[in-house]
Amino acid sequence: MNQKRWIVLLSVIVLVLSITLLAGQRNSDDAGAKRTITFYDSQAQEEIIKYEVELGDSVTPPTPPTHKDYLFIGWFDENGLEITDFSKILKNQRINARYGNDKNNNGILDSEDTYYEVVFYDTIGRRNIATERVLVGLDAKPPVTPTHRGYVFDRYSASFTKVSSDLKI
């Protein structure tokens, strides 16, 4: 019985050493391994910069390009998950700059910005001829001017450029 214990103990020691050596060998294969990180501009559909780094190193993201009518939201991976930590690079990765609409270029996403209602009113026909939802700071688009016998359209009653409040014109 004592001999069986020694055989079992020796077998366990050999197994543990084998696992340790294999794990160490795998890690030594990764030593000096390079990873490629590509920063990509999803709006312009082009590569911004590509880094080749050692496994486990970190990268500093580049300054994202700016685009008229768009606002940089953040860096996202291929699965659409936002990336905020660029330390410990463990795999090759394409990181995409994501943008949202900012049509008035005020640094606020359109989805979170202020809109105003501009109503164009026909004073002769006594009816609304158009209603438009306008993003703050942008111009409303005038509708087709109604025609009335004996009248000539002169002008709108107020300006509808760079809208900053609800208007009835």
Image (cartoon, grey):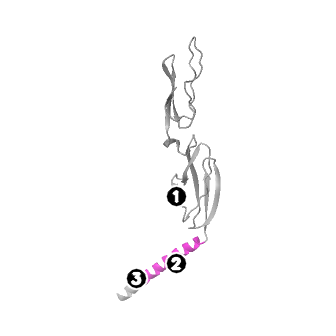
Q: Amino acid at mark 3?
A: Val
Amino acid carrying mark 2 in the image:
Leu
Is residue 19 magenta-colored?
yes
In the rendered image, which quarter is residue 62 located in? Answer: bottom right
**Of the pair 87 and 21, the residue shown nearer to us:** 87
Q: Name the residue located 40 percent from the left edge and 86 percent from the top edge.
A: 6
Vertical position of residue 159 compared to residue 96: above or below: above
**Residue 58: x and y, percent?**
57, 65
Disc on the earlier residue, 1 or 3: 3
Point out the tag, 2 or 1, that comes first from the N-terminus. 2
Residue 8 circle label = 3
Q: Could you say where residue 148 lies in the image, as x and y percent from the top left?
A: 56, 14
Q: Amino acid at mark 1?
A: Thr
Whole-angstrom CA distance, mark 2 to mark 1, is 36 Å
Residue 33: horizontal and vertical position, in percent? 60, 69
Q: Which residues are magenta?
A: 7-31
Label 1, residues with CA under 10 Å away: few <14, some 14-19, many ≥20: few
> Which residue is identified by label 2?
21
Mark 2 lies on a secondary structure that is helix
Q: Which mark is residue 84?
A: 1
Q: CA distance from mark 3 to mark 2?
A: 20 Å
The CA span between labels 1 and 3 is: 50 Å
